[in-house]
């Protein structure tokens, strides 16, 4: 138990250093952006706003202060538990993230489960049938997906299922013109299905290829040969020896892919106009909304950190031979 607490303390200290680095880099990059935050805030009415009004807007959001002053003011607020106010949504950053993440969580959660289940299944089938036609088909499928841009896959599926076949909605998280309180569970799932499927397709390739390689290594190991010599079939070796050994790399990849999943959701939500955290990230970047952008950066870093930590902790459950701070 002592080793686990030491491990968690080390991870937490690394996480704090990461947040400091992220906040400084993000603040500097947004400060050097060519986008004028006042013009972005005013939007289409930029020609109707005079110099005096622009100055008032700058004072309201603290944009008339130097970058270092704004950074330390923001840091002081953060230490008091206040992430600031979003210029884009005119709400506190905490409220924006909470509302948007609720929609994104359903999307990313469904995509995460789909990609993990299908990735492991395809990897096991390809590894067990090494060199066969089905193995070649799965590898071509995985290599194609691994090299294809996420937005291109999203547009392709949108054209096929929403425009040509018309079996899925073309955008949004609910039918237009209906209040959020009146939306049924089926309507929510109907609008969620295609974005989740698109996001999961992107994550399948890595899981499938790594699972295949690990299973082939197991099937050629000495203990597998010994099992074959005792009359065990390939299916039996896969079920009794393979699945447990491929579980560790598969789980590691699946939890490590949370960062890619979050990044992929930004593009997918933009293509499908899905009102999640990814869409809010794009709006914050386009409008130089520094408080919201930093809040989302902090939140996404925490999200990925929790995922990686859960993957590390799951090792002991799956393989008790692994102990923190000790060699196997």
Image (cartoon, rainbow, N blue to C red):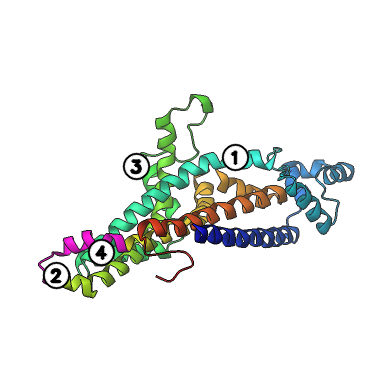
> Mark 2 vs mark 4: which is more N-terminal?
4
Query: Closer to the camera: disc 2 or disc 1?
Result: 2
> Mark 2 vs mark 1: which is more N-terminal?
1
Query: Closer to the camera: disc 3 or disc 2?
Result: 2
Q: Can residue 189 be seen in this view?
A: yes
- x, y percentage for residue 204? 37, 57
Image position of 156 (left or right of 4): left
Identify the residue under disc 2. Answer: 228
Q: Is residue 141 visible?
A: no
| Total count of labels | 4
Identify the residue under disc 1. Answer: 98
**Residue 126, labelled with which disc?**
4
Cβ–Cβ below 8 Å for labels 3 and 2?
no
Work out whether 70 lies above or below 180: below
Residue in the image at 34% along x and 59% along y: 247
| Closer to the camera in the image, 101 or 29 | 101
Circle 1 Cα neighbour tier, 10 Å, few/some/many (<14 / 14–19 / ≥20): few
Real-space Cα separation, disc 1 to disc 4, in angstroms: 41 Å
Circle 4 Cα neighbour tier, 10 Å, few/some/many (<14 / 14–19 / ≥20): many
**Which segment is the magenta one?**
227-245
Identify the residue under disc 3. Answer: 165
């Amino acid at each position: 138990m002592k080793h686990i607490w030491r491990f968690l303390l080390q991870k937490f200290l690394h996480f704090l250093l990461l947040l400091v680095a992220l906040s400084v880099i993000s603040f500097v990059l947004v400060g050097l952006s060519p986008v004028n935050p006042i013009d972005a805030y005013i939007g289409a009415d930029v020609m109707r706003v005079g110099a005096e009004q622009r100055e008032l807007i700058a004072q309201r959001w603290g944009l008339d202060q130097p970058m270092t002053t704004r950074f330390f003011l923001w840091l002081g607020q953060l230490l008091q538990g206040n992430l600031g106010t979003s210029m884009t949504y005119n709400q506190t950053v905490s409220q924006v993230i909470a509302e948007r993440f609720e929609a994104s969580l359903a999307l990313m959660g469904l995509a995460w489960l789909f990609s993990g289940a299908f990735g492991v299944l395809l990897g096991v089938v390809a590894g067990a049938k090494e060199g066969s036609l089905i193995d070649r088909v799965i590898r071509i499928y995985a290599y194609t997906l691994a090299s294809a841009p996420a937005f291109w896959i999203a547009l392709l599926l949108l054209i096929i299922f929403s425009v040509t076949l018309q079996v899925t909605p073309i955008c949004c998280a609910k039918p237009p013109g209906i209040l959020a309180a009146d939306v049924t569970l089926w309507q929510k799932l109907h609008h969620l299905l295609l974005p989740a499927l698109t996001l999961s397709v992107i994550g399948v390739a890595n899981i499938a290829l790594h699972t295949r390689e690990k299973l082939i290594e197991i099937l050629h190991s000495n203990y597998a040969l010994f099992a074959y010599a005792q009359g065990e079939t390939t299916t039996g070796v896969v079920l009794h020896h393979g699945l447990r050994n491929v579980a560790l790399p598969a789980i590691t990849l699946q939890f490590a892919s949370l960062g890619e999943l979050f990044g992929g959701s930004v593009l997918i939500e933009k293509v499908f106009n899905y009102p999640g955290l990814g869409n809010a990230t794009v709006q914050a970047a386009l409008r130089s909304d520094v408080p919201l952008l930093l809040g989302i950066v902090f939140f996404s870093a925490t999200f990925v950190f929790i995922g990686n930590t859960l993957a590390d902790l799951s090792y002991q459950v799956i393989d008790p031979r692994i102990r923190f701070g000790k060699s196997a």
